[in-house]
Amino acid sequence: MQNIRKQLVALSLITGVTAAFAQAAPDLAAMPDAKPGNAAMIELGKYFFFDNRLSGDWGVSCATCHDPQKGWGDGKALSTGYPSMEYFRNSPTVVNARHRIRFLWDGRLDGSDAGTMVRDMITEAHTMNMDSRLMQERLKQVPEYNALWAKWRKDDINGMRVFNAIGEFIRDLESKPAAFDRYKKGDEAALNAEQKNGYALFNGKANCVTCHNGPIGADGKLHNTGVPENPAVLKEPVRTITMLRHYATVGMPNYMNARTDVGSYAITKDKRDIGKFNTAQLRDLKYTAPYMHNGMFATLDEVIDFYNAGGGAGSELKPLNLSASEKKALKEFLLTLSGDPVIVKNPGQPDMQVRTAYGKN
């Protein structure tokens, strides 16, 4: 009897461990219910997001590189950046920022702090090139902004809180419900047989789920998949200059000799991070081409072929050996992660008026 008890205990321990592993296995998830943010901040942040007076020369707004009509990116392989500059990376979507663990392709910013990410994009010379002190004085000259600000706070418009308001607006942008969400919530008919086969491949033979999991299909980690360099970065000197300046500002050793996008290494200075980039989300893939940190793949078919081959030089990936029909099924499944596009109308840009309420003479 005592031996039977021991066997039962051992069996329960093994079963418990197995269950724990099964429970911990990564998978895609349905989008969680939206969490309402601060309505006053969101309304104000929306105006600021579309206002080009937040850039140094009034030339660009946040929406220039994150256009609602282009999947909240800019539709280009490599972003343009600040006027007279050209950038060396792709402009990613800002939808689902609330679910990001890291921000930016090199993963250098905490995904829980959208305000800091906005600050960096507005104040960086190669993106919007704005001095926050000048920015707040410009915004104070807009009566409508002062009125909206007063709904939120009792002080004057000021720098970091402007960034936080835009961050709150961005965090409010979430993917619309998609076929995959309906399927995960129990609607078997939401996916057809081919799409279900693609989902099985995603979790099995293709092993996409290792890095692409959770509600937005991104693990928040840095990976080297060997994406080839975009030749425009070195062919176009202005892009090369921007890349080298970025390396200089983050203190990367020997940066002037760099001729590739080293990714996270520029931030960590750990050679093991050369070529590592933040995992891209899979939500709304239908609207966010071209793909990868440098826009090297124009279509989803190219991305699947790249992964099927095991990635590029130095990749941590292995060949998948998917057949043509399997690649098609995988693509059809990936498209079920896109719902209707997330569209926010530009609220317009209120006129400026000279502000005279600085006190009595």
Image (cartoon, rainbow, N blue to C red):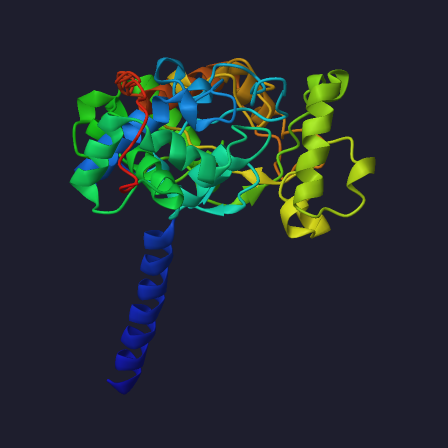
* Count of numbered circles in the view: 0
Location of the N terminus by quadrant is bottom left
Q: Is residue 25 above or below residue 131?
A: below
State the image quarter where residue 150 is shown: top left
Name the foreground residue: 34 vs 298. 34
Q: Which quarter of the rendering shows the C terminus?
A: top left
Task: Indicate the position of residue 109 as horizontal and vertical percent values.
Answer: 49, 46
**Residue 60 location, x and y as percent?**
47, 20
Using residue 196 as the reference point, say whether residue 285 is left or right of it. Answer: right
Residue 13, percent from left and from top: 33, 70
Q: Nearer the viewer, residue 319 or 248?
A: 248
Q: Is residue 35 visible?
A: no
Residue sitting at x 70%, y 17%: 232
What residue appears at the point 37 percent right and 22 percent down from the top-left corner?
51
Quarter of the image where one finds residue 352: top left
Judge whether 12 appears above or below 218 on screen.
below
Taking the spot 43% from the left edge, 29% from the top edge, the residue there is 201
Towards the viewer: 167 or 136: 136
Confirm whether residue 131 shows in the render. Answer: yes
Which residue: 64% across, 38% down? 263
Q: Nearer the viewer, residue 208 or 102?
A: 102
Furthest toward the front, the residue is: 361
Task: Note whether 298 is above or below 337 in the view shown.
Answer: above
